Amino acid sequence: MGRPRRGLAKKAPPPSGGGGGGGAPPSPPPPLPQEGRRQQQQQRGLSGAGEPERSPSRAHAEKGPAGAATRGLQQPLGRQLPGGASSAMKRGGGGRRAAAGKNGSPRPEEQRERLARGLRECQDWLRAYLNETGIFIARADSKIWITLIMAAVAGILHWCHITALFENDRHFSHLSTLEREMAFRTEMGLYYSYFKTITEAPSFLNGVWTIMNDKLTEYPLVINTLKRFNVYPEVVVGFWYRLYTETMNVLGIPTKKCWTVNRGEDLSPVESCEGWGDPASFYVAMIFLLNGLMVSIFFLYGTYLSGNRFGGLLTVACYFFNHGESTRVMWTPPLRESFSYPFLVVQMLLLTYILRTQNVNRRSLIALSVSNVFFMLPWQFAQFVLLTQVASVFGIYILGLIDSSKLQKILYAHMASLGVCFVLMFGNSMLLTSYYAAFLVISWGILELGPKYILKMCSRRGISVWAIEGFSCFLGTITLKFLMCLIFGTADDAHISNLLKAKFTGYRDFHTSMYTCAVEFDFMEKQTPVKYMKTLLLPVVLVVFSVIVMKTFQHVVCRKELSERQEDNFNHGEIVYHALQLIFFTVLAILFMRLKLFLTPHMCIMASLICSKQLFGWLFSKIQPGTLVLAILAMMAFEGVANLQREWSIVGEFSNLPQEELLLWIKEKTKPDAVFAGPMPTMASVKLSALRPIVNHPHYEDAGLRARTKTVYSMYSRKPAKEVKRELLKLGVNYYILEDSWCLRRSKPGCSMPEIWDIEDTANAGKVPLCTLMSMDSRPYFRTVFNNNIYKVLEVTRE
């Protein structure tokens, strides 16, 4: 039996124009007939899971169907249709003048032939379209429908999985509108508030104008949230929601169904609405659909990288078996990585194709640049990930695995996307003063000046040239970053440098302690590698990584000897790139536990290379790749299935009665223009649900906001109450929300708020914290106007 669900006995209120909304994503189309592929299969002589060619030729196709089928695959993307499409068109064109029957109507046999010919042409056109738009696996896969269906199934399974986990954890479908908003804690509530603004505005453009002239988030300032925050996802999803509801209203199709839910425990009943017509349900559904699609891309990614569908299967299986270490979208949907990371997967697939292909066309670079934009716009930390990526690509250039021309094209694509993001974020200076921007400029400069100066100093490329180029890039990036910050006069990301400094030294200040005391910004847990070992993900990746290192060493150091002996020369820059990227992601995850979301999925991608003929061709002469993968999956499944069962066993129901009381009191007892201050997570809820102005919030990436938050948090210091009140009045605060638990709570020694304040406020060290005094008696500088077992609202008196 399932768990008892509150509200099983629901009462439907009078009809309110709602009905069963939502629905599942469309099922994948059935595979088309195989006839149009026969000639291609004969000409290629490849299995459906063959490795895509690395060096497509620019030679023109020979005349005739057979020649077109053979050489069509060798054309670079964007040049012509694949050979199969060309030959099918020629076959189809020759039979259009069929004889008619006695009455001038075509015979049934002719109709069937026309239909079959049309289906073949449709299939071949789709193959060509997939080539042009970036699903490159079609180029070597004669059974593309099987691959696409498997990818679609993987995506649908992940969509169902995370949807079920979220519902089991929150019982989200039975919550009231207020409870759903409270379920979006901390920065999630802040981001969702902008979606709410757009959906409730008189028009979409009015909603966009409101968030571009926001008067509530940092009172008394008026800020452009599209410039300050990464809220373009809320703008797009808000537009989709308005379009969806307006279209359904025009068609007369109900989008939601509302019920009265009895909560029990002497609590008042609430109205709960189900269906995509409910804003919160639509918002979460879009996130889950995007992350379901991401796993479909994962399957294609693993298949393309390894050259085998079993590689894609292993990638997806590893992702599911290590799901708790790979993502947290099922627990915290509105976080920025939920929108951003799926586009990184697409971007890395595109980059893999570019690195694997000798002749890179413009469309591939444009696609790479667009995916960069989609990755950077939703998340402020995306620039640091892209920094590691261009550093990895620069690394394979130093090793001689790609030429300077290809690296230059990749850098231009990154520069273009950075410029687009800079414009779309209304000149956000944090982008131009980032390490990412500085690295792009310095690495481009090395490519331009290196042949003139570096190679003149050294007779040939070798370790000395590598050292000079690497050191120049590292030192130049730091220097240019420092100069750009001086020029633009910005210090918004200074806390990142201090945070890295704190990781490697004993440095501490107020702001770095706010980060390092949070669990997600602490070092990786010791249990994480153990979990990787139990699912065999770490052993498989270590084997793959070791073989890559060995083959790269042989290629770089023994290149001449291998060439003389005419032995196979390992020249696969895309594979070495993934190894270097793995190193960077490992370092990031060790330093910041939150960044496991990059490491674990990338390890799943690396695991697919166990099927690569370039790495393990000698093994596949003795054993089939499918047999090897199935054996690995069987061993992984012992712990992997147990991990999934642990996720499925998580059952709960969201409830936060103290905060609900607080928000209802604020809406009923305070003026709409009353200004609030307090802990950052609570402030997000006050803005979202009570629509009151706040002076601080959880988006901690702005220097001015960090200074405001430090002033607000002086309530948890040991400063005199008179001094704290004076600073709050300067910010225009009317009410301060005090949480007693913040006085005592600490994640580890030295991490309670009074202890953090002692780092900088040494003059008052040893005194009783002000928050403790306020809990006992808030007079004479404040007046307690609301109190429950969690929250206390202090009015800042004006006497």
Image (cartoon, helix red, strand yellow):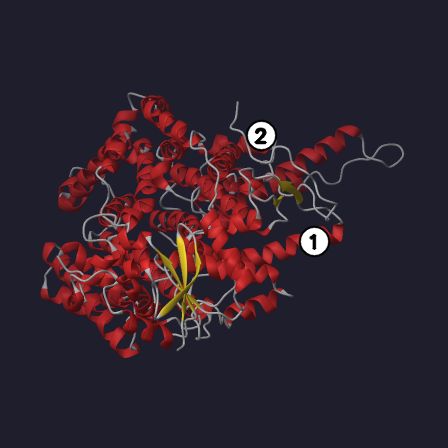
Above or below, 420 relative to 110 = below
Q: Which mark is residue 362?
A: none
**Which of the 4 quarters of the picture holds residue 510?**
bottom left
Q: Nearer the viewer, residue 523 or 354?
A: 523
Q: Nearer the viewer, residue 741 or 747?
A: 741
> SS for tag 1?
helix
State the residue at coordinates (12%, 54%).
Answer: 462
> Which amino acid lies under the numbered mark 1 shown in the image of this protein?
Thr
Residue 781 in view of the camera: yes
**Mark in the foreground, 1 or 2:** 1
Read off the residue under disc 1.
247
**How many C-alpha atoms fall within 10 Å of the one at disc 2: few (<14), some, or many (≥20)?**
few
Q: Which residue is nearer to you in this view: 645 or 387?
A: 645
Where is residue 543 drawn, in percent x and y?
A: 22, 32
Spatial CA distance of label 1 from label 2 is 39 Å
Residue 740 appears left or right of 67: left
Kind of residue sitting beneath label 2: Gln
Q: Which residue is denoted by mark 2 in the rendering?
A: 34
**x, y percentage for residue 583?**
23, 46
